[in-house]
Amino acid sequence: MEIKVECRGMEIGEAGGMLTQVLDTLLARIVERDRELCLDELETIILADDFADALRNETGGQVSAGVVRAMHRADSVRLLIDAKHMASALAGDAEQVAGFVHLFHRELCRIHDARARLGQSESLELLLDCEFDRQLLPIAESMWAEYYSTRRAVWSLPQGSDLMLTHLADLLEALPPAMSEEIVLHMGSNDIDGLFAKSCGRIAHLAQTVAHCQGYLAGLERALAEIGPEYQALLDASPLGPAWAPLMHRLGVLFASPSRTTESIYLALQGDVAAMFAAFGLRIRRAEDGGVWVDPFPLTGDRPDQ
């Protein structure tokens, strides 16, 4: 496996050689440990001292957040890394070094999964013709990407990591009142479409965080109550509590499946995505015209059957 490392930017300077050597060593060790990790189509790793600018140049998009990003083409993958972040991590303590190694490892796992699914969903375009599926599919796919990458890369997880449970706890405390407030405000103005659009971002972030945590727990083969009883208690008391175990089961079944397509992942997780909306006050369903029908209800009121 030969992967080209390309340095971009005047600020990298002499550090480029060292960073390239580190990446070569990391790649060799990760592939040696995980021999089934397929990176045959990873063509180039780009180390850029201006990550945002490099990402815009590569994709033409405006989104520039992050420090590692895979860019998929029909027959190859290019991986962009923030050189400043990498150099800073390697110059830090052992925890910072381990954090970068795990971040890099997780992105390689995401590349493996995405390439394995590429071109495997024959009816995906038909799904995307429907507004309901077009809205929910990205949420389901991002959930899967988080779960798969954290579960597969769990052996490089730095010691002492909180598995993102602290962030999940923050969301479980903040979302119920925030969603209820949005529902009341938008119902007052009869702006249900605006309510759904605004809620999508919040639910998508929650879904990714949940799947991220569940991937680590599954990879470690440990229950949430065992690792953090206080987190289990918070989950049980939250609206998300009933949806946790069914989602973890379905993600585990998908992980064990010998073959997965983007379509099969979405169809398996569609109900779980809808359950997350319902848990925080929005019951959604497919309208007759293929759009999204939303039945909002503040969490302080009576909750309809899901």
Image (tube, rainbow, N blue to C red):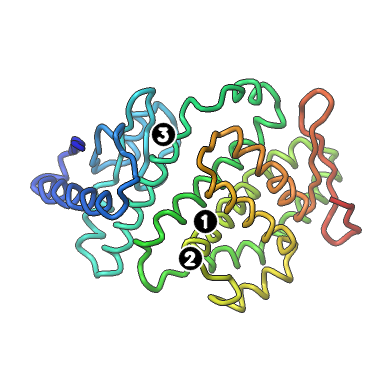
> Do the numbered discs 2 and 1 sit on residues whose CB atoms are within 8 Å?
yes
Mark 3 or 2, closer to the camera: 3
Kind of residue at badge 3: Arg
Q: Residue at x 60, y 42 (%)?
A: 139
Mark 2 residue type: Leu
Q: Residue furthest front?
A: 258
Q: Is residue 123 left or right of residue 115?
A: right
The disc label shown at residue 115, or none: 3
State the CA–CA distance, disc 3 to disc 2.
26 Å
Q: Is residue 97 above or below residue 294?
A: below
Side (left or right) of 180 relative to 210: right
Name the foreground residue: 185 vs 283.
Answer: 283
Q: Quadrant of the N terminus?
A: top left
Alpha carbon separation for disc pair 2 and 1: 8 Å
Q: Which residue is mark 2?
A: 163
- For label 2, the crowd category at 10 Å Cα-Cα, with few meaning under 14, some 14 to 19 and many 20 or more, is many
- Residue at image x 65%, y 21%? 126
Q: Earlier in the sequence, mark 2 or mark 1?
A: 2
Judged from the image, the secondary structure of the residue bearing numbered disc 1 is helix
Q: Which residue is mark 1?
A: 212
